[in-house]
Amino acid sequence: MQRYFVPKEQMTDTYVTITGDDVKHIIKVMRMTIGDELICSDGHGRTVRCEIEKANDSEVLARVIEPLIPNTELPIRVTIAQALPKGDKLDYIVQKGTELGAQAFWPFSASRSIVKWDEKKGRKKTERLMKIAKEAAEQSYRERIPSIETPLAFSKLLQEISGFTKTIVAYEEEAKEGRLMTFAACLNELHHGDSLLVIIGPEGGFTTEEIDAIQRAGGAPAGLGPRILRTETASLYALAAISYHFERMR
Amino acid sequence: MQRYFVPKEQMTDTYVTITGDDVKHIIKVMRMTIGDELICSDGHGRTVRCEIEKANDSEVLARVIEPLIPNTELPIRVTIAQALPKGDKLDYIVQKGTELGAQAFWPFSASRSIVKWDEKKGRKKTERLMKIAKEAAEQSYRERIPSIETPLAFSKLLQEISGFTKTIVAYEEEAKEGRLMTFAACLNELHHGDSLLVIIGPEGGFTTEEIDAIQRAGGAPAGLGPRILRTETASLYALAAISYHFERMR
């Protein structure tokens, strides 16, 4: 059944009011009409099955039939802190990371990040990434739309580490030793509802100073398998492994 | 240390002869000279550390110092059978799948594959994919370059299933039930050296007839987590989960 994200305030206990581009999609593209059913989610964990009661060019009113129990969210809340990569890699990281269950994306500038975002550019890019996340969340049947932060400074990222249950930083030197132990040990210690911060370096990798700083702040360097992954692949590996670790017994 | 793939016949027990584009890369880009060390792999599992003894514009001769024990290959041999996707998605699947450890890629045409490859187009595209696989294998420190087949017919794919230890087919309906059990159970039954065929459908998914045919041929439908993954994401999820399953204890 077709799914749409609707602003929280447009979803009451009994009715959902759909506005904007989705109206055109429902009426013109999906050719739905009075009595047809669709699924709406407020993007914050509430999802309902509902039936179209009224529809015009600007608004679709749907009556709530039943709430649906969310089951497409990872049991732990994963935030991906991604050092600004080159080109359109961040678009790709957000799209795939959303499909794979990330809760939030925090771009940040590492000392080897070639790309720099000024405030204006940062705001525009962030809006673009939010759109990509919303579309990927709908397509993958997510209950939540991941949040996208405007790029933070590395020093700010370090301060945030203490707010998470666990933090790992993808580290090539660990990978070269072909060990996943740190990562697996970290996942073994996490439980339903816990939060995990996964920090990924830029194309050139982190400096040893940055790795040391992350460790002092409480992050653990972890290899993501014996092969050297590109910066845009590391977060996807981590998310897929987290899904496999926590969701295979569902 | 810089790595290069060299044709088997150019690697004896004592010497490696590097020719072609890599010579320019070694001399001009890396600015290496007599006495510098590099790593060469024959792309079939033999990797050696060697020292440059002679070098000119067309050839680099390097003396073998020691063989290196491969440790960047997945313990099971994974073949990705990917239904032809739209646009340049296959480039991306091969690049990322190589980073993540796939041994072979078999494109095939499913009934809902929109793209069709004629023989000429197929040959050119396959050559392009081989180049992508070689570069990704070097970058990710693989010991082997994955093989790329020219697109097979679905009927041919069915015949090949019996040649693998296990075969799974990514199936959305399983995913919607949010279960990874079939996939995890399959991995639990595989051992070092076994072969696994992972079959991924096109954008529109497989028809029930195709799923039935794959099952009759011995493949098991498996969900890859509760979220609906795009066709280009499914193989990456499978490979990352396989790495996590088999390599975390290394």
Image (cartoon, coloured by chain):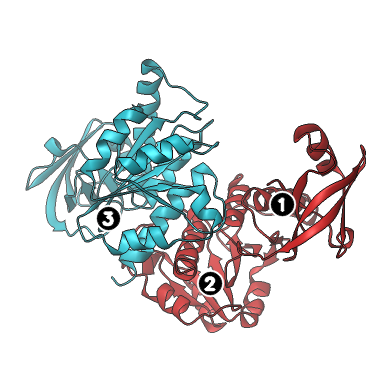
Chain colours: A cyan, B red
* Chain of the residue displaying label 2: B
Q: Secondary structure at mark 3?
A: loop
Residue under mark 1: which chain is it in?
B
Residue A192 position in % (x across, y down): 21, 60
Q: Residues within 10 Å of mark 2 (few under 14, many from 20)?
A: some
Q: Chain of mark 3?
A: A
Residue drawn where x is 43% and y is 73% of the image: B183
* Disc 2 residue type (three-letter): Glu
Is any part of residue B19 visible from this angle?
no
Q: Nearer the viewer, residue B43 or B18?
A: B18
Closest to the camera, between mark 3 and mark 2, is 3
Q: Is residue B182 left or right of residue A203?
A: left
Q: Residue at x 50, y 55 (%)?
A: B231
Which residue has dot 3 on it? A73
Answer with the quarter of the image where residue B75 lies.
bottom right
Q: Which residue carries the number 2 mark?
A: B210
Task: Please say if A217 is above or below A189.
Answer: above
Q: CA distance from mark 3 to mark 2?
A: 29 Å
Q: Which residue is mark 1?
A: B134
Q: Is residue B13 visible?
A: yes
Q: Amino acid at mark 3?
A: Glu
- Farthest left residue? A13
Please rate how many residues cluster around mark 3, counting C-alpha atoms within 10 Å: few if below 14, some from 14 to 19, many from 20.
many
Report the number of numbered marks: 3
Q: Position of residue B200 (x, y in %)?
A: 53, 63
- Could you say which is closer to the camera, residue B115 or residue A218? A218
